[in-house]
Image (tube, grey):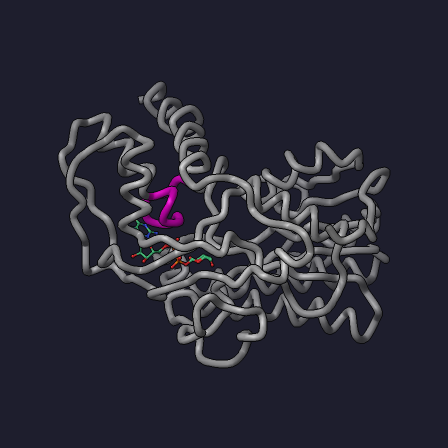
């Protein structure tokens, strides 16, 4: 494994976006690092406001930042809320990255997304594929914002010598996901639908699209472990892919969740909904070469996400119903 070049012990570490799924996992992982963790609630800090961000950073004086704050959502939210996805993400990135430079933050790790790669990228997607073709239209706004984030980190590195790095995680799932049928990501939506079908004894569940697109899913706790690894072990321009390197079809995902939920029935396909990119799987050889790989088995991760949903969302809603 590559050596530690940026130890976190004793450092003040700001997790921007701690209330989201990725940020929450980073907090849990950082608890093992003996560092001082800094967070800011949305009501105290609006990261779309430059002055607020710079004042907050100047007062809190973090040594390091995990930039996990972002406007995120699944294929429907990406398609229908393009202005928000572009504006909010650009604003958050520019404010936090510029503020980090102004306040002398020693290291920053920016989280992007595998949707930065062109629609026709050869699979598995290598880091070098960035900006080699047209983007997938369903998430173009989000992708443009995330590409800008990578380029901001690179520009501040080249012009000002800042140690700002970027990681591009694949599709994520796990505890703390946004359980929203229309706006959420596919794993969360499928968990919700299957739990509802099981509870109601429904014999069919509707899946968007054809069920044939392929996606690579990374469990949040593996994501956080990979990010902490990069913060401690890596420096350099550009970005690194963070995933499992393994993909499944949407249909296989649905079957796997059905098994975890204990539901057996038939999947119906709503072909009026988009498939999006037909395949999205990353080449993770650069992370592997550094000495890191994802550890969680897909079934185990899905079980953990499903159990979290039942305990924290479904049962609470039933309690209030
Ligand atoms: O996670 P998701 O919404 O976004 O997955 P992307 C979309 C895929 O799952 C499409 C199928 O092929 C959909 O047709 N799908 C099936 C469903 N049933 C459902 C359902 O009930 N809900 C949803 N949402 N999809 C993501 C971006 O793109 O890529 C993220 O939205 C991020 O922001 C990530 O960038 C890496 O996988 O298409």
Q: Main secondary structure of the magenta part?
A: loop
Q: Give the image location of residue 315, x and y in percent.
A: 37, 22
Image quarter of residue 247: bottom left
Q: Which residue is drawn at 56% across and 65% down?
A: 146
Left or right position of 28 against 250:
right
Is residue 210 located in the magenta-colored stretch of the structure?
A: no
Q: Give the image location of residue 19, x and y in percent.
A: 58, 39
Q: Give the image location of residue 53, x and y in percent.
A: 72, 53
Is residue 183 located in the magenta-colored stretch of the structure?
A: yes
- Asked if 241 appears above or below 55 in the picture, the reply is below
Camera sees residue 46: no
Left or right position of 302 against 241:
left
Q: Give the image location of residue 204, x and y in percent.
A: 15, 39
Residue range corresponding to the magenta coloring: 179-189
Camera sees residue 14: yes
Q: Which residue is drawn at 54% across and 64% down?
A: 87
The one nearer the camera, 157 or 32, is 32
Q: Which residue is drawn at 84% across and 47% down?
A: 61
Q: Residue at x 36, y 49 (%)?
A: 186
């Amino acid at each position: 494994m590559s050596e530690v070049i940026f130890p976190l012990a004793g450092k003040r570490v700001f997790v921007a976006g701690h209330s989201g799924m990725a940020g929450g996992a980073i907090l849990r992982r950082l608890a093992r690092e003996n560092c001082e963790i800094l967070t800011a609630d949305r009501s105290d800090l609006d990261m779309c406001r430059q002055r607020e961000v710079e004042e907050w950073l100047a007062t809190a004086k973090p040594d390091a930042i995990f930039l996990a704050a972002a406007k995120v959502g699944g294929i429907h939210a990406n398609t229908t809320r393009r202005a928000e996805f572009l504006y909010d993400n650009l604003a958050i990135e520019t404010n936090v990255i510029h503020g980090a430079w102004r306040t002398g933050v020693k290291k920053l790790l920016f989280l992007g997304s595998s949707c930065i790669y062109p629609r026709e990228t050869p699979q598995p997607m290598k880091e070098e594929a960035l900006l080699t073709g047209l983007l997938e239209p369903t998430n173009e706004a989000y992708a443009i914002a995330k590409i800008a984030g990578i380029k901001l980190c690179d520009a501040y590195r080249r012009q000002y010598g800042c140690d700002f790095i970027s990681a591009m995680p694949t599709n994520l799932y796990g505890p703390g996901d946004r359980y929203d049928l229309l706006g959420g990501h596919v794993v969360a939506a499928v968990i919700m639908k299957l739990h509802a079908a099981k509870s109601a004894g429904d014999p069919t569940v509707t899946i968007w699209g054809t069920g044939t697109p392929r996606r690579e899913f990374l469990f949040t706790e593996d994501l956080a472990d990979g990010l902490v690894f990069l913060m401690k072990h890596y420096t350099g321009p550009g970005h690194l892919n963070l995933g499992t390197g393994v993909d499944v079809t949407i249909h296989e995902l649905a079957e796997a969740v059905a098994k975890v939920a204990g539901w057996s029935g038939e999947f119906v396909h709503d072909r009026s909904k988009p498939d999006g990119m037909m395949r999205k799987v990353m080449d993770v050889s650069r992370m592997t070469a550094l000495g890191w790989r994802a550890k969680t088995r897909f079934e185990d991760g899905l079980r953990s996400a499903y159990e979290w949903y039942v305990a924290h969302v479904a049962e609470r809603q039933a309690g209030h119903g």
